[in-house]
Amino acid sequence: MLFSAAQLSATPLNVRVVDSKGWPVREAVVTFRSNGSSTRPPALGNYKVSQKDMQFHPFVLVVPVGAKVSFPNLDPTRHHVYSFSPAKKFELKLFARDQSRSVLFDKPGVVALGCNIHDAMTAFIMVADSRWTAKTGANGMVHFADAPSSPGRVSVWHPYLRAKANVVEQTIPAGNRNATFTVALRTPPMAMSHGY
């Protein structure tokens, strides 16, 4: 299917994610994929997941395919960071305070992180293959200033979302520049609540 230049022009797109009570959902990853074009994000920037106060920071990190992520340890104890996720399997064996290791994330998908010593430590890295991928803040909103105005799909992923693969999607017709998702979330384990 071909789209005219006008249909492929950039138009701001706003996506809102709320729970079943209407409260904003933060840490949800929103992705827009246009039917008329596909643009991978550049693998630029400094990305990191710190270990501090026996938690990973941030809880959810969005990076482009090809990004290198550092894992600095800011705790007085050693950590052993790993993932068994299909998008990236890796293991960073014991490293101490003020030491850091790096990992290259070369395939799209969700990477669940854990610490082999501290089971309550969890976090997630979303490796994005669309440049229109972002994480909601405390207001549950994502704003894409330059999304194509052609029709496409918006997906929302959250680690506690009650859906297959923790993802819900909806089609966005051409010209519709606002979307709202009402999602159901599982209750997180107490040690992993991250404020939910």
Image (tube, rainbow, N blue to C red):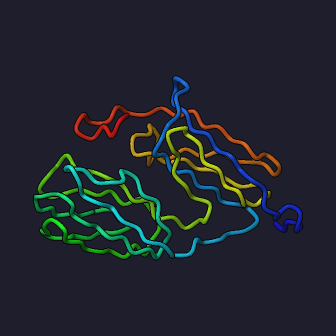
Residue 139, by quadrant, is top right
Image point (44%, 74%), residue name: 67
Q: Nearer the viewer, residue 113 or 101?
A: 101
| Quarter of the figure with the N terminus | bottom right
Q: Residue lying furthest top in this view?
A: 21
Image point (28%, 67%), residue name: 71
Q: Position of residue 5 (x, y in %)?
A: 88, 68
In the image, residue 69 sits, relative to residue 146, either above or below, namely below
Please count the marks in the image. Answer: 0
In the image: residue 147, left or right of residue 187 = right
In the image: residue 115, left or right of residue 60 = left
Residue 144, by quadrant, is bottom right
Image point (59%, 43%), residue name: 141
In the image: residue 67, left or right of residue 89 = right
Q: Position of residue 51 (x, y in %)?
A: 24, 58
Image point (34%, 31%), residue name: 187
Q: Position of residue 3 (x, y in %)?
A: 85, 66
Q: Nearer the viewer, residue 22 or 169?
A: 22
